Amino acid sequence: MEQVGSVAKEKGAAYPNLLEGVKGTTVRIRVPAAAVPRVRARAGEEITLDVRRGRSPDLLFAHPDLEK
């Protein structure tokens, strides 16, 4: 993961960035089955996703809307 950032919310505030610790590492991201056909990336290509962390720090999930 090359870049991580906070998620903006109302009135200029932001949700805490819970992914700062994975910056610069390789991560596995779960993509909802219904969204898979919309992902056009091939192995080795870069994409930008809105990602959420699961209950465990090593579980990451793509937002259903996928690419940002």
Image (cartoon, helix red, strand yellow):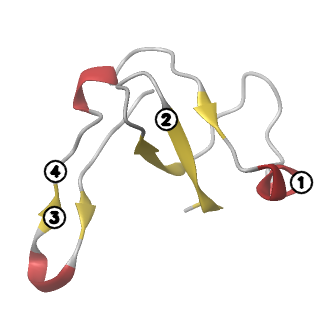
Image quarter (top left, top right, bottom left or bottom right) of the N terminus: top left
Q: Quadrant of residue 3?
A: top left
Q: Is residue 9 left or right of residue 52?
A: left
Q: Disc 1 residue type?
A: Pro
Residue under the image location 36 percent in, 18 percent down: 24
Q: CA distance from mark 2 to mark 3?
A: 19 Å
**Decide: marks 4, 2 in contact (CB < 8 A)?**
no
**Residue at x-position 79% and y-position 40%:** 41
Mark 3 vs 4: CB contact within 8 A: yes
SS class, disc 4: loop
Residue 40 x/y as whole percent: 84, 48
Q: Toward which corner of the image does residue 65 lie, by quadrant? A: bottom right
The residue that label 2 is drawn on is 60
Report crowding for label 2: few under 14, some 14 to 19, many 20 or more residues within 10 A (C-alpha). Answer: some
Residue type of the residue flagged with mark 3: Ala
Element on which disc 3 rests: strand
Reading the image, the residue beneath label 3 is 14
Name the outermost residue toward the front.
55
Closer to us: mark 2 or mark 3? 2
Residue ID for mark 4: 16
Inspect the image, locate mark 4, and give the three-letter code of the amino acid beneath it: Pro
- Residue at the right extreme, as displayed: 37
The nearer-to-camera label among 1 and 2 is 2
Kindly identify which numbered label has been placed on residue 20: none
On the image, which quarter does residue 54 sit in? top left
